[in-house]
Image (spheres, helix red, strand yellow):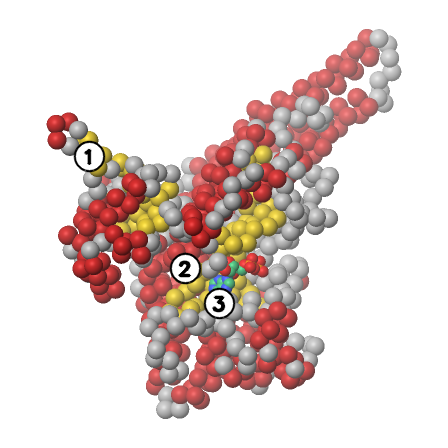
Amino acid sequence: MEEPVNIPEIFGSLVFTDSEMKSRLPEAVYDSLKKTLSEGGEIEKDVANAVAGALKDWAISKGATHYTHWFQPLTGITAEKHDSFIAVGPKGTAVTEFSGKALIKGEPDASSFPSGGLRATFEARGYTSWDPTSCAFIKDNCLCIPTVFRSHSGEMLDMKTPLLRSMDLINKEALRILKLFGMTDVTRVVPTVGPEQEYFLVDRKAAEKRRDLMLTGRTLFGAKPPKGQELADHYFGSLRPRVKEFMRDLNSELWKLGVYAKTEHNEAAPAQHELAPIYVAANIAADHNQLTMEKMKIIAEDHGLLCLLHEKPFEGVNGSGKHNNWSLETDTGLNLLRPGKDPASNKLFLLILVAVISSVHKHQDLLRIAVASASNDNRLGGNEAPPAIVSMFIGSDLEDVLNTMAGMASSNTKGASRKLESGVKSLPDINRDTTDRNRTSPFAFTGNKFEFRMLGSSHSVAETNVIINTIVADELRSYAEFIEKAEDKAAAIDAVIVSNYKLHSPVIFNGNNYSPNWSEEAKKRGLLNLPTTPDALPYLVSNENIELFARNKIYSSAELLSRVEVLFDKYAKEVLIEANTMIEMSSRQILPAVLKYQNMLVDTLKARSELGLRYGSSAEKLLADRMDPLSTELLFLTDELKAAVSACSVLSSSREKANACRDNVIPKMAELRKVCDSLEEITGSEYWPIPTYADLLYGV
Ligand code: ADP
Ligand code: MG
C-alpha cells in the first residue's frame, strides 16, 4: 500500500515562508527587514545576522547541512556552490555558523559562467546577492538562498535581475493606467505566469546505450517506428504504472517546495507528458519552473527513467514546448485580462488587450528571440508547433467587439452581428466558445490570460517574461502619457483603443498557423518570419531594441551586446556538440555495425559460390548490393560533416560560427542522418548497435 499524501500538511514544508520567518524573528527585527525590503536600501548588519541565524536553525531542523546561493546564470539553468554550516569551535570542536554577510552576498568564482564579454578574466568575479522576493528553501539537504548574480560593475549576469526589473516596470505603468480609470485602491500590479511543462520519459537503461540522448538530449539518428502518434491514443491516455509512480513522487517533492503542481497528463506523442502548476507571480514562477525541471530529471533517475526536456527529442513525433500563460493581477485580486460579462463596455480590459496586441505586433522580433535556441529551432515550424512567425488569436467575439468599435469590417466571415447580439455578452461564451479554439496560434488569448506557445520545454521562463513585461509596459506608458494629457479622458481611452487596434490588427490571425499558406499570407502582412536562431538574434541589438531596453532600464546596451554574444555562442556550441556526437556514433558504432552485417552477407555469398550454388539473384546478393552504396555514402558524409565542423571551428567570432553551423553543419547533419536511417531500415535488428525509436518510445 502506498502511503497517503496529505497535501496541506507537506505543502511548503521545505520552504522558509514569510510566516515561518515571522515566527522565528523578534518583532522589531522582522518589521525592520520588511521596511527595508519595501523601501529599498541596505539591510542593517544586526538584522541580517538575526535573519541568517533564524534561517540556519530552521534549515538544520529540516536536516540541512549546507547552504548555497542559488541563481540563474545566462546558461538558462540554475547554479549553486555548496558551503557547509561548519566552523571551527573552541578546542578543535566544530560548530555551525551562518552569518548575515554570508546570507546577503556571495562571491562564486564566476569566471566560467557566460558573460558575453562583460567581464575580463582578471576581474572575473561576479557576486550573488540575496533576492528576498523569493523564499529560501531546502533541496537535497542544502539551504538554497535565491539570489541575483551581477558583475562587480553592476551589470546583470543572470536571468533574474532583468525579470525583477521588468516586473517593477510593468507595475509602475499599469498603476498609472488604473489611476486613469479611477482605481486608486490598487497599490501593486503583478504579472502572473503559469508555465505548462512538457517532457518525455524514456527507459534509462535503453537511453544510456545512445550517446546522442545522453550527450545532447535528443536522438540524432533513428528511422521512423512502425507506429508513431497517428492513432492519437497516448494523449490523455491512462498512465503507465512507472509513469504514475514518477508523477506521484514528483508531485510530493514539488509540493514540499511550495510549487502548486496541479495538472498532469499524457501528451500527444508516445512517451510524452505534461505538468502544469497553478499560476503565481512571474519571478516565483521562474524559480519554481527551474525547480520543477530539476526535480523531473532527478526523480526520473530514481525510477530508472530518463527525463528529456529537449524541444525535439524524436523526429516525426511532437516536440515539447512550455506554454507561458501570462496575465496581470492587482493586489485587490483583479485580473486585468478578465473580459467580464460585457467586454464591449469594459474599456480597461479592452485597453490592456489592445496594448498586448500592439506590443506583440511591434516586437515580434523580441518574442522570437525569447524562444530562440538551437534545440527549439528543431521544433518550431515542425507540423505540430507554431512556426517561427509570431501571430495572435483573440477569438471571434473579442475581435467583433474591437472591429465594431473601430468601424472595421469583421474578418470573421461567419458574421459579426449575430455573435455580438447573442453570445458576446456572456462570460462563459467568451471563455469556452471562442477563445480556446485555435490551438495552433503562437500567442492566444484564452479567456482571461494570454498563452504564448513558442517557448521551448527546456527554456527558462524568465527571458520570455522579461520581454512580455517590457513591451507591454512600454506600450502602456505611451497610452498613459496620451490619456493623462487629454481633457476628455473617456474619449482619449476610446481613441487609444481604436487607433492602436487599427494599426496592429494585422498580427491577428485566426487560421491554421501550421498550414503552408500561412507563411505566404504572413509575408503579405509584413510579419517577420525568422526560422532559425542566427536569423533572429541580430534583431536583439537593433537600434530600436537598444533604445527600448534602455528607456525602460531593463538592459543596458552593454548587457544586450553581451546577451547576444552568449546566445550566438551557445547556439554554435550546441550544434557542434551534436555534429561531433553524430560523427562519433557514425564512425564508431553505426558504420562498424553495418559493415558487419554486410560482411555476413558477403561471407554467405562466398560459401554459396564455393558450394557451387546459384547466388546472382539471391536475397543476400540483392541486399548486399543495396547496402554497399549506402555504407560508402555514410563514410563519405561523415567525412564531409567532419570537414564542415573543422571549417566552423576555426572561425573567430561566435556569430560567424553560428551562421556556419546553420548554413553548413546542420544541412550535412541532415544528409548523414538520412542515409543512416535508410541503413537502419535494412540492417538486421540484432546487428543494429543502438536502441530504435520503437524501443525508446514504447519502452516504459
Ligand atoms: P491548457 O492545457 O488548456 O492550456 P491548463 O489548465 O493545462 O490549460 O493550463 C493552464 C495554465 O494557465 C495553468 O498553469 C494555469 O495556472 C495558468 N493560468 C490560469 N489563469 C492564469 C492567469 N490569470 N495568469 C497566468 N496564468 C494563468
Ligand atoms: Mg496550454
Indicate the position of residue 425 as horizontal and vertical percent values.
59, 81
Q: Earlier in the sequence, mark 2 or mark 1?
A: 1
- The residue drawn where x is 86% and y is 12% is 613
Residue 313 versus residue 418 in the image, above or below: above
Secondary element at image label 3: helix
To which residue does mark 2 refer? 282
In depth, the one of 162 and 346 nearer the eye is 346
In depth, the one of 341 and 407 nearer the eye is 341
To which residue does mark 3 refer? 360
Structural distance between the alpha carbons of marks 2 and 3:
18 Å
Q: Is residue 229 left or right of residue 337?
A: right
Residue 62 versus residue 370 in the image, above or below: above
Q: Earlier in the sequence, mark 2 or mark 3?
A: 2
In depth, the one of 669 and 317 nearer the eye is 317
**What crowding class fits label 3: few (fewer than 14 Cα within 10 Å), some (14-19), or many (20 or more)?**
many
The amino acid at mark 2 is Ala
Structural distance between the alpha carbons of marks 2 and 1:
39 Å
Q: Earlier in the sequence, mark 3 or mark 1?
A: 1
Tell which tag, 2 or 3, sits nearer the viewer: 2
Q: Is residue 147 left or right of residue 401?
A: left
Secondary element at image label 1: strand
**What crowding class fits label 1: few (fewer than 14 Cα within 10 Å), some (14-19), or many (20 or more)?**
few
To which residue does mark 1 refer? 95
Secondary element at image label 2: helix
